[in-house]
Amino acid sequence: MTEKTVHAVQDEYPEDFAWCYGCGRMNENGHHFRTGWKGDKTITTYRPKAEHTAIPGFVYGGLIASLIDCHGTGSASLALHRENGHEPGAGVEPPRFVTGSLHVDFMKPTPQDVPLNAIGTIEKVHPKKWKVHTEVFADGKICAKGEVIAVVMPDTFAKK
C-alpha cells in the first residue's frame, strides 16, 4: 500500500513554523513527512533513504520514532482543523501542535527499501490535547506502533 498525500497539513503551516526536521517543508535537510486524511484515519507515507540504515537492509529505529512523532502532531492538527470547520488545501492556517509525550513499540524489523505507511487513529482528550495511535506498515505488515500525546503549541513559541 503506497499513498500520496495531496493536501498535507504541513503544507499549510506558516514558514516561521515549518522548520521541523521531521515534517518541516522549509528544512532542506529534513524528512518532509506529509500527513493527510484517509477516510477517518490519517496517513503519512515515507520511503526511507540509504542513510536511515540501522543494519544493512533495515531501517534505523530513530527514523520510525520520528515518523510516529510527526505523524502524531500532524494528525492532531488535522483533527482540530477539521473540528474548526476546515480542511488542508482551503487556505486556512491550521493549528500547530507539539509533542507532550511519545511512546514507540517496535514489532519487527522494518525493511529498508519499501515505503512506510503510518496510519493514525485520533482521540480527543482535552480541547488542547489529543492522543494519536499510530501503526507503521511496510509491505502491508505492521512494523511499529506508537502513541503521541499532542498539545496545542503554546503562544510562547511564536516569534516576537
Image (cartoon, helix red, strand yellow):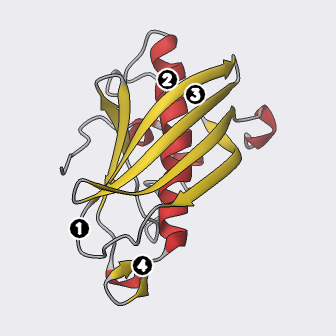
Q: Please name the amino acid that badge 4 sits on.
A: His
SS label for mark 1: loop
**In the image, is 53 to the left or to the right of 127?**
left
Where, by quadrant of the figure, is residue 130 drawn? top right
Q: Please name the amino acid that badge 1 sits on.
A: Val
- The residue that label 4 is drawn on is 52
Where, by quadrant of the figure, is residue 88 drawn? top left
Taking 83 as reference, is 62 above or below it? below
Tell me the residue at 55%/70% (across/down).
Answer: 62
Taking 11 as reference, is 92 above or below it? above
Q: Please name the amino acid that badge 2 sits on.
A: Ala
Viewer-nearest of discs 3 and 4: 4
Q: Earlier in the sequence, mark 2 or mark 4?
A: 4
- The residue that label 3 is drawn on is 95
- Give the percent coordinates (x, y) of residue 113: 24, 75
- Give the percent coordinates (x, y) of residue 132: 55, 35
Residue contact at pointers 3 and 1, CB within 8 angstroms: no
**In the image, is 99 to the left or to the right of 50?**
right
Is residue 18 visible in the rendered image? The answer is no
- Give the percent coordinates (x, y) of residue 16: 59, 47
- The residue that label 1 is drawn on is 114
- The Cα atoms of the two marked residues, 1 and 2, are separated by 28 Å
Q: Please name the amino acid that badge 3 sits on.
A: Pro
What is the residue that sits farthest to the bottom in this orientation?
56
- The Cα atoms of the two marked residues, 1 and 4, are separated by 12 Å
Is residue 61 visible in the rendered image? The answer is yes
Please count the marks in the image: 4
Q: Earlier in the sequence, mark 3 or mark 2?
A: 2
- The residue that label 2 is drawn on is 79
- The Cα atoms of the two marked residues, 2 and 4, are separated by 30 Å
